[in-house]
Amino acid sequence: MKDKSIGLELRSLNNLIKRRIDNSSAKKEIDSITGTNGWIIGFLAENADKDIYQKDLEEQFSITRSTASKVLILMEKKGLIERNGVPHDARLKKLTLTEKASKASELMIEEGKQLEVTLTKGFSKEELEFLFDCIHRMKNNVQET
């Protein structure tokens, strides 16, 4: 294990996943959507029945407040999301998809399902559960330091 680096392997896998997303048919059809925008649109679409705020994206994607803010500002400029105030707290802005993003989300959700099938091909249910456990433990280790 001395010659192997988990960090480098995860970074490499992340790059491959990002490249796959950026070259997907859904991405080609909607050129204003980056890989990160796609993940956020997918998350908002899957949680359309809930109120989602910036802090939820920060937690879900383990990103900083400033990163989330910059991404959301750009997504708003591209016409992908809207930020609307809520009656119970003037500071909160609920995130909702525009019609443009909703249409794109259908394509991206299907692409995401296909990517999951590709990523998990050949793994047993037990192996996947163990992998998720390992990943969660690594995330906790990094967050604790």
Image (cartoon, rainbow, N blue to C red):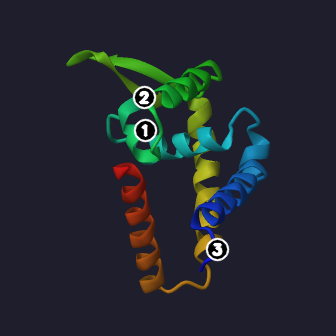
Q: Residue furthest front?
A: 2
Q: Quadrant of residue 126?
A: bottom left
The relative height of residue 112 versus residue 42 in the rendered view (above or below) is below
Disc 1 from disc 2: Cα separation = 10 Å
- Residue at 77% in and 52% down: 25
What amino acid does circle 1 point to?
Leu
- Label disc, if present, on residue 4 of the rendered structure: 3
Identified by mark 3, the residue type is: Lys
Callout 1–callout 2 Cβ contact below 8 Å: yes
Q: Number of marks in the image?
A: 3
Residue topped by disc 1: 57
Helix, strand or loop at disc 1? helix
| Pick the front one: 33 or 67 | 67
- Viewer-proximal residue among 142 and 75: 142
The answer for how far apart the CA atoms under marks 3 and 1 are is 32 Å
Residue bearing mark 2:
95
Indicate left or right for 54 with 113 as reference. left
